[in-house]
Image (cartoon, rainbow, N blue to C red):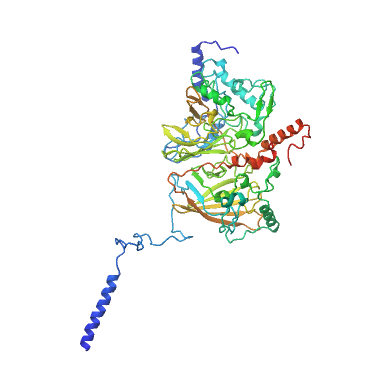
Amino acid sequence: MRRYLGKAAILLSTMVVACLLLAVKPVAGQAPAAGAKAPAAAGSGGKVATPGEFPPYKPPHTADGKPDFNGIWQAFVTADVDIQDHDAQAGPHPDVMGAYDAWPGGQGIVEGGEIPYRPEALAQKKANAEKRMVVNITSDDHRHDTGDPELKCYMPGVPRANYMPFPFQIVQTPHVIMMAYEFARALRTVYIENDKTIPEKPPADSWMGWSHGHFEGDVLVVDSKGFVPYSWFDRAGDYHSDALHVVERYTQVSPYHIMYEATIDDPKVFTRPWKMSFPLYRRMEKNIQLVDFNCTEFVLDLLYGQYSKK
Amino acid sequence: MARYRGPLWSALGIASAVLLCAPAFVAAQSSATTSKAGSAPASNSAAQAANAKSAGSGKAWVMPRTADGHPDFSGYWNQLTFTPMERPAKYGNREFLTKEEMEQVFKSGVRGSYDPGAAGSEDRYGGELFNPDSVDYDAATYGLSPWQNGIQPNPRTSLVVDPPDGRIPPLTEEAKARLAKGTRPGGGFPYVVDDHHGGATVHADNARDLGQGTSCVTQSGGPPLTPPEYNAGVFIAQNTDSIVIETETGSEFRVIPLTTRPHVGANIHQWHGDSRGHWEGDTLVVETTNMRPDHTYRNGQPDTEKITEYFTRTSAGTIEYKFTVNDPATWTRPWSAIIPLSASTGPMFEYDCSEDNNDAVNILAGARADERKAAGKPAGPISQK
């Protein structure tokens, strides 16, 4: 009996070990069975991409040794409606527009969720939101007192231009970085060369700001001031003053993504600086280019109807 | 006006001397930087700033180039010109002015910029705009004065260089009929209707009647690039793949790919069309298609009008900008013009048109007030507050 059991044990253990060895198949070079999940290609890490996580990435450089941001980019957040968390909602005239003009819900892009308004400024934001559709164009500056400038196809300002639901093109040269926006054909010039003929301080106020850029390693940092106080951050009435100071950081995290972050500093409106952040996606359609969205032609009656012949 | 009767040869001799000596007349041609092909150029705007200042140092100018060796047009330019589009009759068939004539046109132009009807400004635009009764504003309040913005004297008698008589070819019969139906002429103020009896009425029922410019739908950019009387700045940003041309009036821009990528499909129409650039030696050639039917150059026929532009940097201070208009449905033959771009200094400011369009408010409100007055009612407030 002992002799039989000993041989059986050896046989059994040998069989177990053999089975274990046979069950561990080499991954490389093996075609999956039909319907089975394809194993990852050799060396890829084998994991489905996780939102919020990017493996380390070094972007290509331009001929003058800077990270290359050339391309057409677009955000896919709904921050233009509201930079904070928001439900979907009917648009302004659902009886006519139905689902065409319903606004999507979305998660906010404000880091930490709260916008640190000064108390009186928060009241202004709420007033803005209530009157966002009011249009009363006059021939003085008070034309900008009420209503969302986006409705009027005015320039979107910064950083709203970067999260409008339209693409924009970055053209990068050794002297400047141009950001050309499809929405309302807005344009930003970011001075990156140490050119003494270009003033450091904004020589005049503008809707799209006065921007100086520099590189910190592979990160593009853009510092902007000199904004007129008329642009809004979204349709929900979030706004700023002429003291607005925006510092943006553009970091390429893959061949197809820029992680974008904007720090908003405006002591007239907010109690402290705060940040918005979201990814920008490279538009990858083969012959992608900007297509006109010169919405001024669509708003002429909205703007000037009160002065038109009846 | 009396025709010049001087011998042709001496006129040619003078014209040649003007061409050869022209660099001595204009701002310095020296380059503040040199640049090796293939290396990133040093500051182009610094070079241009140096060139815009006084006397030359005698150094030879070297063309700045992008990393792939093509000419680099980056920087600030100004397209303001005092040369008329078509050759005035008094110059006969001369393509070039004498040195004295060139100086006179330039002085006239500068004088007329401040005061369009002033004595001494008669030669500006060949006298096209001379009006001693003019109440036009001083254009220099809206932008750099001509002595500040880098504009240089132009030795040509007209911007049109082909046909050789310096005049735009005749319209075809079809175009005459098309335009007689009331197509809005390019430029000008379409809501001001000349009564051909020394007066004019305003027809401004709504913002569309004001025209594309005054309603701030589009104000500049072309193609082709044609300069207004002020705010004629042009900013160019260029890398190996694209050239961005920003025109000051309206802050409009064109992004022109320097690739062989096909044009966008025929069902897409753009205010500045769809452009593709390629190099022929050191000349950038830009071909544009897909123009909007309601925004063709000089009311060309949208299906047939082709505009080709040629950019050639001829010196530190000048880009020779030439365009050819080819539209057999509108003109009896193709024609071309050269409008130089002069090196200028930056920055170029954002131009907010629609955001601050007081003209639209005031012209429309004024027209409504006139109607009320004509109907015997009180005019009411013109400028709404």
Q: Nearer the viewer, residue B233 or B359?
A: B359
With B204 as the anchor, is B93 left or right in this view? Answer: left
Residue B9, position as x, y percentages in the image: 48, 12
Residue farthest along the front direction in this orientation:
A95
**Residue appearing at x 54%, y 15% in the figure:** B92
* The one of A264 and B52 positioned closer to us in this rendering: A264
Number of marks drawn: 0
- Residue B218 in sight from this viewpoint: yes
| Residue B208 place in picture, x, y as percent | 62, 35
Front position in the image: A214 or A245 = A245
- Give residue B284's quadrant in the image: top left
Residue B143 visible in the displayed image: no
B5 sits left or right of A131 in the view: left
Q: State whether residue B320 is above or below residue A283.
A: above
Q: Residue at x 52, y 32 (%)?
A: B223
User: In the displayed structure, does residue A52 sit left or right of residue B186?
Assistant: left
Q: Position of residue A44 (x, y in %)?
A: 37, 59
Residue furthest left as drawn: A3
Q: Is residue B186 above or below residue B90?
A: below
* B15 w.r.t. B298: above or below: above
